Image (cartoon, rainbow, N blue to C red):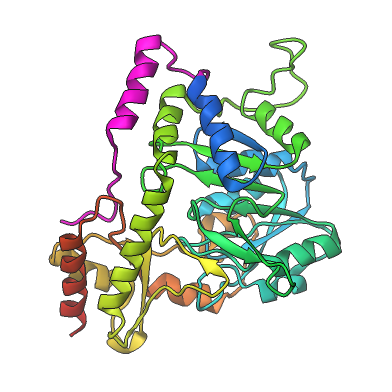
Amino acid sequence: MIPVNEPVIGDLEKQYVNECLDTAWISSAGRFINEFESGWAAYCGVKHGIAVANGTVALDVAVAAAGLQPGDEVILPSFTIMSCAAAIVKQDAVPVLVDCDPRTWCMDVSQVEDKITARTRAIMPVHIYGHPVDMDPLLELAADYHLLVIEDAAEVHGAEYLTGRDTDHPVWKRCGGIGHMSTFSFYANKLITTGEGGMVVTNDPAFAEQARSLRNLCFRPERRFYHTELGGQYRLTNIQAAIGVAQLERMDAIIARKRWMGEAYTAQLKDIAVLQLPVEEPWARSVYWMYGLVLDESTGMDATEFAQRLAALGVQTRPFFLGMHQQPVFWDMGLFVGERYPVTERIAQQGLYLPSGLALTEAQLDQVCAAVHAVLS
């Protein structure tokens, strides 16, 4: 079975991990924590990085650091992972949904303004499967309505967005360096992995200070074990950070490999009329975190059956996200009842992604494409 994802761990990762073991800096302090935080923040073009235990925690910390009050609203796409809406609900705030764009599968930014109310405090764009959200319209809305932008950049390590393209001086910016705060995941299937792990990045020193406090039980700097707020034990270990530092050193090669993968898949699958393949808009430089497919209903198959047939040919896949408005746990809270987001619903039913890990070989990619052709011929 060709796995849907397999990370690549090299000699430098092992060298840095062994340094942690040899020096006994194995917990949540050490040189690699500092290097990973500062290195990743600088790579994203921002000043502050706050490493945490995983991407879900990064969202929790960022939303908490935003200082939302009960009943405040945050606009986000329905087509995303559970962690995004859950982070909002945990603050007794209200997630407000929009559909996704049928081309990029990212947040449909044209629907956002209609969802803004007097209670709206933030917008949470989620970059999907390696492709950026169209951020400029959201930044304009945020400025007009005095809203925060909290980017979920978990799936777009190194992806770039052309901001200011309607001006005389457009600038390419890395995703995660565009919003007021941004979150990353370093799970095993991400471009950079620390096994588990995440980070909040920001240019705002107040947000950074609050995020650091929240990830460390909100200890008061002037008096340990004295607490005026509730935080958590959300720290990353020095061992995990060591792996991240090693991988950051080869980030250009990682992105090049992922872009080769996306382009190679497209070259072999573009002739299959019943498949929608990933796009790359002119204002985006995708990193093809996962290579997604949306199967046309005319085939008589949904993604579940498609996945089963590919598995029979030795190809592992994963389904697309199920929309937040289709999650029973939120219905039980009285959220999203009766709401419909047709693009999200369709691609959740008809979409899956193919093996896309950095360890995927050219021969395996050819085998995957042959299996897709065989199922759909």
Question: Where does residue 263 sit, x and y in percent of width and height?
Answer: 34, 70
From the viewer's perspective, is 76 left or right of 11? right
Name the foreground residue: 287 vs 335. 287
- In the orientation shown, which residue stands out farthest toward the left? 313
From the viewer's perspective, is 291 left or right of 201? left
- Residue at 32% x, 89% y is 298
Name the foreground residue: 218 vs 263. 263
Q: Quadrant of the C terminus?
A: bottom left
- Residue at 18% x, 64% y is 311
From the viewer's perspective, is 301 left or right of 24? left
Above or below — where is 168 with respect to 37? below
- The part of the image, by quadrant, that contains residue 141 is bottom right
- Residue at 72% x, 46% y is 92
Name the foreground residue: 182 vs 88. 182
From the viewer's perspective, is 269 left or right of 49? left
**Residue 190: in sight, yes or no?**
yes
Q: How many marks?
A: 0
- The part of the image, by quadrant, that contains residue 314 is bottom left
Q: Is residue 245 magenta?
A: no
Name the foreground residue: 10 vs 139. 10
- Stretch of the chain drawn in magenta: 1-30
**Residue 57: in sight, yes or no?**
no
Q: Is residue 26 magenta?
A: yes
Above or below — where is 116 with respect to 224? below
Q: Quadrant of the N terminus?
A: bottom left
- Residue at 58% x, 60% y is 331
Question: Where does residue 60 sit, x and y in percent of width and height?
Answer: 61, 41
Question: Where does residue 277 sit, x and y in percent of width and height?
Answer: 38, 76
Question: Where does residue 9 sit, x and y in percent of width and height?
Answer: 29, 38
- The part of the image, by quadrant, that contains residue 246 is top left
